[in-house]
Amino acid sequence: MGRMLEALKPAKAGTARVTELEVPAPEPDAVVATETAEEVPYIEVGGPRTTVDASRAVLACPGPVAVAARRVPAEVKPPPVAVSTDSWTVQFQPWSREAGPAAAPMRRIAPEVIAYHQPDHPVARQYRSLLTGLMGQLPSGWGQVLLFTSPAPWGGTTSVLLNLAITAARQEPRRVAVVDANLRRPALAERLGLGPAHGLCDVLAGSATLANTLQETAQKNLWALPAGRSAGSAVRLPLDWLLPTLRQLRQQFDLVFVDAAAWNEGSEVSALAATCDAVYMVMNHGKETPAPNDPLSLLRQPPTNLQGCILTMR
């Protein structure tokens, strides 16, 4: 295509934009455009050995691509296009609880859970013997639900239950769950070092599922179903919703330990006990039982499936 020229008036001095172009040294056979006093803008596309040729004023205009005005001789081949070989470097960094500000420190299991902290302690050995006696009373098979209560509040039920549950969880491959059904005074999550989360109250209210509320604990093979955030204001257990929950727990776990309120605090405790396989009464020997050989005298209506009494001593 021939060169198309159009006579235009030259730009006024001081108004032209100046763009610094890095032009390589001219090769022997190269023809470089020279600047004249009065440059006539032009542009040429195509040609035998030229892709783009233009005057300096045209090249100084902003555009998507900056092209140097240069004619390539026949004997000189254009340099190959430089392709970047840089690539991303990927490195795996294991995550740890100490890494990052969002990692919250785990709270410790309560010190009275001696079976977890000191499994070789004489008290921990007593809990192993106690668990052996309890398991001998149960029928063969798995999916047993054991309820623990006390004649009066603050009888130490939670501590006894957790020591027995952790002792059972250490006997692999047994899967154990603990359930906080003491909605008046929930304590199971705090003793296990678990944070506030949904729990039994939310499952019974239909606002959460059992799978989303069960929490793994620091003890292997032990899961916890806490009472839930709204447990302090709840005083009754809706039995019609509780029975399906217990059936699911029977199917998923070998042993289920239920921490219930004091026996004489409400009729819902006795109704819950009737749905369990065995009931155990926890009593403080120096505080609740003036006659430890007759603990049932403290109960108005003892449960029909009461399997024994566990006496604690400080």
Image: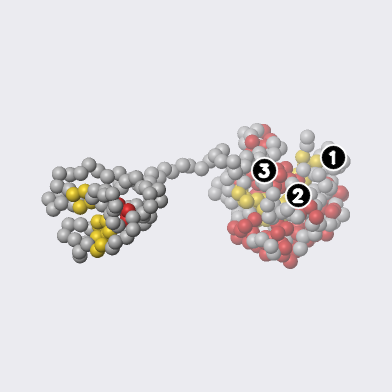
Residue at coordinates 23% horizontally, 58% vertically from top-left?
Answer: 51
Chain-order first, disc 1 or disc 3: 3
**Foreground mark, 1 or 3?**
3
Where does the image place residue 129, in percent across and percent down from the top left? 66, 41
The residue sitting at the top extreme is 121
Q: Quadrant of the C terminus?
A: top right
Q: Amino acid at mark 3?
A: Gly
Residue at coordinates 17% horizontally, 57% vertically from top-left?
Answer: 49
Q: Which residue is mark 1?
A: 287
Q: Which residue is mark 2?
A: 186
Q: Are marks 1 and 2 in contact (CB under 8 Å)?
A: no
Q: Which residue is mark 3?
A: 193
Assess disc 3: are there few (<14), some (14-19) or many (≥20) residues with their C-alpha within 10 Å of its C-alpha: some
Where does the image place residue 254, in percent across and percent down from the top left? 60, 54
Q: Amino acid at mark 2?
A: Pro
Asked whether 15 or 203 is in front, the reply is 15
Q: Is residue 164 visible?
A: no
Residue 309 to residue 252: above or below: above
SS class of the residue under badge 1? loop
